[in-house]
Every structure is written in C-alpha cells, then in structure tokens.
Image: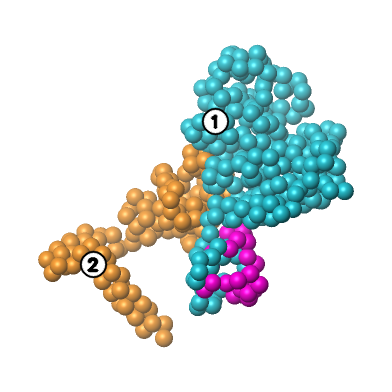
C-alpha cells in the first residue's frame, strides 16, 4: 500500500499528481500488479481532498490499463511499468554516473548537463519516433 | 446522479430595508458535488445559505432543493443538513445529550454514526460542549449534521474561526464523510485556500451578486492569462475572448480572459490560471464595477 503525498506548490492537478506517483512507484518496483490502492474514502480523509479527485485519479489509471476497480472490494494494480528494464537499471545508472563525472571534468555545470541531456533526449527519441511512424 | 440538481435558485433576492443582501441570484449545484461558496464578508453568502435552508423568505425569485421549495416543507428539510456560522450549540449540553436530542427532533437519525465519529476523534461525549475547544465543537456540529444523513449539507464558514490544525482536521472529517455517502455539499468561506482541494464546483459571490459559478475543471479550462502587446479597451482581443481583468504597462498588457478555445496568435503567450487567480480576478473586477454603481435600491 502506498501513501499519497501532494505537492502544494505544484501546478500539476491533484489527480495527476496521484497518477504520476503511482506510475513512479510502479517504475521503481515499489508497487506491483496485484497490490491494492488505498480506499477512496481513506485518501480523501487523510489528504482532506475531494473524493471525486481520488476517483478521477483511479479512473485515469484504469483507462491506462494499470489498475482495475473491483466493485465492493477496491482498486487493484494490474499493469506494470517496471518491466524487464528494471533489471538493467543498475548497470545503466553506473554508466550514467561515470558519464556525468566525465561531463563534470570537462567543465559542464549542472544546468549545462541538464540542457544537453534534454536536447539529446529529444533529438534521439523524437527522431526515432519519426522513423518508426513515417 | 451527477446531472441531477441538488440546489437551484432563479432570480433569487433578499432585501434588508433598502439594501439587497442577495440580488438576482441564479445558479444550480449539481448533485454529488462539493461546492465552494466564496466571497468577502458581507457578500451575501450567509443569506444565500439561509434561503436554501428555508430560514429566510425570498423577496424575489425562488430557491429549490431537489426540486422543492424548502420553506415549511418537512420532507425537503429532512434532506438538508445545516451547520450555521460559528457552529452554535447549546453550551450546557454534552455531545451525547445533543445526539439524543437530535434523535427526538429528526425522523431519520443515525445516532451510532455520530457517536462513532466523536469516539474516533477522541471528543469526550459527557463534557458540556461549551467547555470543548473550537475545533471539537465544530466536529460535534458536523457529526450532528451528518447523523441526519442529509442529501444536501450546507456549511456556513465552518472553519473560519478555527486554528490551522483544527481546520485540517475538520476538512479531513468532512471529506471522509462525503467519501462514504453521496451527499452534496455547499460550504462557504471567505478564503479559497482552505477549500481549493476539497471543492469541485465554485460559486463566487460579491456585493450580493453571483460573479462566477461552474465546475472547477470547466472554469480552469475556459480561463487563461494572456501576455502580449499593449491593448486599449475596445481593441480586438485574439480569439474573441472576454476580458475578465486587464493590467497594462506602457507596452505590455496582461489579460485574464475567458475563451472557449486556445489562442494561437503568436503575439500573445498563454498561461494557465489557478483557481485562486480566477477568484481574485472576478472579485476585483466586481469591486471595480460597484465603485461606480451603488448597490442600494434607488427606486
């Protein structure tokens, strides 16, 4: 079971913050298929938010095929985002750390690194997407 | 269920002497919503709530609760829970006595529900409520209103006089209670911040008139802030948007507009608005208008 945390300063809609938190938990393996999400009433009460907002977040997860509502029982996770990539993450992370050290040695500041990663991400993945869907 | 109307007013007005406390108020609150009634002190919020619960007689227009006139209507009043401002309770009575009294005065009364709620919150049932803290008194009033298992729950400034912790606890109790029933809620406040995450429907009231009413998601989608070249009143606005509030420098204009579609004019940059931006814009626009037109009846 996870506990939802809301960022009061974020401009991201409350229900979307909850969706993103569940996805993040699925990605890092904190939540797995079969796990139950907290009950709507319990979330509404502990965060003092509208129960409809919680319902909306759960419906969004259902629409994305990640969760399933079982009437009278609750909402359960059925999909996962961790997949086979989770196993490879440790090694990739090591590579990334050594690359970041190299960038640092080359004189790049934190913002320079972030900008470089951002533009390269877009160039690589968006270019690939164009090739995949011509 | 969502498309049924819990509360509907049409041209509703209430006058005290020559001054309208509420004027030409037409709105509806769909069933299943948690609606915030926001406006400064003296805007007419209490008047609207007291009309809705049949405590006041309208001087104009009508009010309907689940399609019925609530005044002297026992069946409809049984569907309404009302927590008045400052949660007035008989101070010498204990919470347990108030729950018993509620049972004698109401046809539908869930006494175990009220007892459970108070037990969960650790509120002593045998202590006179006048000796409880403000936050505990508010919780007792809420528990009593919920024991009626109302289909429409009206709360007048329920948290205005509470400290921040008691406010949060009150909102937690309210949201939890709504989560297990399909009660429609209308609660008033002069501060939006306390209600922002709780409400999904918004009514802005100022100087006795409704300035804005609608579902929060719709309102946020329809409004945006545009920043662009200096625009004089009367100039064309991109996309045929309606200006709610404008501010200008010598070469730039910042406009909060209501527009159905996104603005694609490259001269203008768009920003999303928050609920707070929206309420403040409508309140200040209404404030500017009434500076020119007094609200007294001139006839």
Residue, far right: B299
The location of residue A93, given as percent across then percent down, is 21, 61
Q: Quadrant of residue A17?
A: bottom left
Location of mark 1 (residue): B162
In what element is the residue under mark 1? loop
The location of residue B278, given as percent across then percent down, is 58, 55
Residue B213 in view here = no
| Marks 2 & 1 on one chain | no
Colour of chain A, in one word, is orange
**Tag of residue B173:** none
Location of mark 2 (residue): A113
Say which of B225 and B249 sits in front.
Answer: B249
Magenta stretch holds residue B220: yes
Say which of B238 and B145 sits in front.
Answer: B238
The location of residue B46, given as percent across then percent down, is 71, 38
Colour of chain B, in one word, is cyan
Seen at 63% across and 51% down, the residue is B283
Highlighted magenta segment, given as a residue range:
B217-246
């Amino acid at each position: 079971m996870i506990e939802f945390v809301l960022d009061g300063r974020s401009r991201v809609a409350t229900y979307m913050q909850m969706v993103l938190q569940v996805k993040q938990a699925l990605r890092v393996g904190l939540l797995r298929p079969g796990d139950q999400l907290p009950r709507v009433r319990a979330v509404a009460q502990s965060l003092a938010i509208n129960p409809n907002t919680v319902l909306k977040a759960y419906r969004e997860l259902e629409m994305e095929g990640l969760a399933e509502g079982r009437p009278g029982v609750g909402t359960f996770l059925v999909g996962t985002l961790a997949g086979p990539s989770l196993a490879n993450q440790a090694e990739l992370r090591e590579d990334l750390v050594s690359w970041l050290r190299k960038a640092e040695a080359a004189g790049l500041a934190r913002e320079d690194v972030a900008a470089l990663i951002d533009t390269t991400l877009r160039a690589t993945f968006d270019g690939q997407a164009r090739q995949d869907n011509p | 269920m969502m498309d049924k109307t819990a509360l509907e007013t049409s041209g509703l007005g209430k006058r005290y002497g020559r001054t309208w406390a509420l004027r030409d108020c037409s709105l509806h609150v769909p069933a299943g919503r948690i609606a915030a009634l926001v406006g400064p002190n003296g805007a007419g919020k209490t008047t609207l709530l007291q009309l809705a619960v049949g405590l006041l007689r309208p001087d104009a227009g009508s009010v309907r609760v689940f399609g019925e006139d609530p005044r002297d209507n026992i069946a409809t009043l049984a569907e309404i829970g009302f927590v008045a401002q400052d949660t007035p309770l008989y101070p010498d009575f204990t919470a347990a006595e108030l729950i018993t009294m509620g049972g004698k005065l109401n046809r539908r009364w869930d006494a175990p529900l009220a007892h459970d709620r108070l037990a969960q919150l650790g509120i002593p049932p045998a202590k006179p409520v006048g000796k409880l803290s403000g936050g505990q008194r508010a919780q007792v009033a809420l528990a009593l209103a919920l024991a009626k298992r109302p289909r429409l729950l009206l709360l007048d400034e329920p948290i205005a006089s509470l400290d921040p912790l008691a406010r949060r606890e009150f909102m937690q109790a309210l949201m939890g209670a709504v989560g297990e029933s399909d009660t429609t809620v209308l609660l008033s406040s002069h501060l939006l911040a306390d209600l922002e995450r709780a409400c999904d429907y918004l009514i802005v009231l100022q100087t006795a008139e409704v300035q804005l009413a609608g579902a929060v998601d719709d309102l946020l989608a329809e409004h945006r802030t545009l920043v662009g070249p200096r625009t004089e009143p009367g100039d064309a606005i991109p996309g045929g948007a309606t200006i709610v509030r404008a501010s200008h420098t010598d070469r730039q204009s910042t406009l909060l507009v209501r527009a159905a579609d996104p603005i694609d004019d490259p001269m203008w940059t768009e920003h999303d608005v928050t609920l707070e931006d929206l309420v403040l814009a409508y309140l200040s626009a209404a404030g500017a208008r009434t500076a020119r037109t007094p609200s007294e009846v001139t006839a």
